[in-house]
Image (spheres, rainbow, N blue to C red):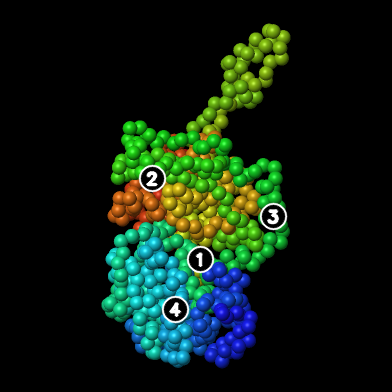
Amino acid sequence: MRPQFESAQQALTLYFRALSGRGCELSPYADDADLWQHPDTATTVRLPATAPPVGRWYDVALTHRALHHAMGTFRLDLNRPEPLFRRIRPAAGSLPALEQFTRLFGRSALAVEVYAVLEDLRIDAAAVRRFPGLAPAFRAAQREALENRPELTLLPPRAAVAEALVRLSLGASDVMAPASLFDSLSRVAAVARPLTLPAATPESSAEAAIRIYQVLAGLPNVGVQRSVRPFAFAEAAFDVDDPWFRLGEKEIRLEGDEKFDVRFHPVRYRDVPGPRYAGQQASGMPLQEAILRMTPDEAAESSDEDTEGLVERSLQAERGGVDVTTTDRPDTPPEPLPHDHGPNLDEDHDHVHGHLHAHGRDEFVYPEWDSVAGRYLRDWTLVRQRRPSPMMKARPDRSHRSALARHGHLLPGLVAQLSRVRPSGRDFVRRSRHGDDLDLDACVDALLDLRTGVEPSDRLYVSVQERRRDVAVAVAVDLSSSTAERLPGTLPAKRILDLQRDAVSLLLEALERIGDVYGIFGFSGGGRDDVRVSVVKGLDERRTPAMIHRLAGLVPDHTTRMGPPIRHLTSLLRRSEAATKILLIVSDGRPYDLDYGQQYGDSAVLSYAVADTAKALQEARTVGVRPYLVTIDPAGGDYLSDMADPQEYHVISNALDLPNALASLYLVARAAS
């Protein structure tokens, strides 16, 4: 009979206290079938209401979790010596050690998960040594966990190596993997194995985590290789003190390849890594949310209630009367762009994977430029237009006002410069009441009216007016998962997306003051059939608190397939009556997506994506839309020069310069109009 939680709760509580030296409250899962439970806290341990069919399973789970406390997992000391690795971790600073450790990495959640798994490995090895009577139960619990792991061969490279690490920690002797990952697997196994030694400490796990993180961060997280063979962990041979391992090694930035929500599949008898592993002892929120809250703006937004009811009133206004969510969505698809659908279209080639079709008013299909074949692939991408979810627990203008407080000193100069930009030329307005000369046609008509007894019009003049050139701009913000990365050297830490929102907040405030028409959009990709365009503000919408709130609600999503969003926003701009149409794109890296040229091999992926993006920009220019790009990718000049004219892009080396750079680029764009 499988043990029940309630019947064993009191005994388990005493057992945990005896091992850890601390009291706790044992709490059952709300749903045993859900693996993604809330993590434990310093005072609460969460367990299934019914244990898996393994003898002494609750003893294994409580022993494992109690030893995390007894053996110092949450008392990391960055200054404490450890005997197993050459030191590459930094000295302790003013922050709690675990929080400082978390902030060392661009992908903080990945680093925390790695540290947690390595500590699980160390703790399990120590538990078997300390309590040999529990060793059979530990091995049985590990076998049961291994039987319920995800299929490694179906995972992309980074997730596959991460899964192999978890299996190693559970006692697996080998895994099935593609030969291309054997070098990475060898490095990971060689670094992890010393943690089973009695001399291993939390600081040893930290050193190992830095090394393994470097291996994982250097792998793409897209694509699956079907050809696999066994890899034996015992055969792994790599020097853990090799100079190849170093802190702060540059990470691969294939735009969006590191899915933001990648997490290690949980092991039931172990705790789900939570805020304690990031130095936040009192919280039981999910790890990702805790890391996001380490950015002060996000924390402030989540704790500040909408006391004025602005959000709800604005949302109610949207739900009644005019449906502003569909202002920029026509009942028919956007007018086609000037793609060449002539003889270069190969029907047989296009039908290898099939055309895509739009099935609703929020879906649109666009072609894609295949640079290798030298032709368009008709109806090859599907754009799904949607609204970002507003953050209902925050005041809508909190982050916007915070951005203006940080960068508002730039606003007066920007508005003044934009106001001085005057389009050249004059327009003659006929049949005016006042003017510089008589309108002869109007005068003749007036004489005829007098002779026929009709009262003549008083519009008898031609007025000469300075030409007023209306401007419409669509601002497109990259929402790829890499925008969740926190920026080194910013205390408190800020994400790339936070800086992008700051830049947009500054620009929209200037646009409001000078009267230019503008729309704000986010974009991301998830394969050719799921390209997402998030509408924060349509071109024909007015500014509302809900719009500001949707801007705050933008979150990192997936990858960056730039071509389809450019084509979609170009279609929206074409319908604007403004004489000047500008597309302003803000990104943090090169275009990249799951199936963006992979059919031609890995070596063609980046060039294929760049070529399609360049083609989409060329299409925009052809129909009178002027594209401009700003990127915080230091290597941006390497590929932007192949996509755009020199005056159409701007590369900044420091993300903190983004608000000023975006404002300056728009000034250039508007002056060029």
Question: Residue 142 bears which disc, if any?
Answer: 4
Task: Tell us which disc is closer to us: 2 or 1.
Answer: 2
Question: Residue 54 bears which disc, if any?
Answer: none
Q: Position of residue 242 (x, y in %)?
A: 28, 77
Residue count near mark 3 (Cα–Cα under 10 Å), binned few <14, some 14–19, many ≥20: some
Q: How far is mark 1 from mark 3, CA to CA?
A: 28 Å
- Secondary structure beneath dot 3 equals helix
Q: Amino acid at mark 3?
A: Glu
Q: Amino acid at mark 1?
A: Lys
Q: Amino acid at mark 4?
A: Gln
Residue 251 in sight in this render: no
627 horizontally vs 275: left or right: left
Q: Residue at x 63, y 13 (%)?
A: 445
Specify which label sits upstream in the sequence, 2 or 3: 3
Specify which label sits upstream in the sequence, 3 or 4: 4
Task: Tell us which disc is closer to us: 2 or 4.
Answer: 4
Q: How far is mark 1 from mark 4, CA to CA?
A: 39 Å
Q: Position of residue 210 (x, y in %)?
A: 39, 75
Q: Amino acid at mark 2?
A: His
Q: Quadrant of the N terminus?
A: bottom right
Location of mark 1 (residue): 494
**Quadrant of the rendered structure where residue 119 is?**
bottom left
- Secondary structure beneath dot 1 equals loop
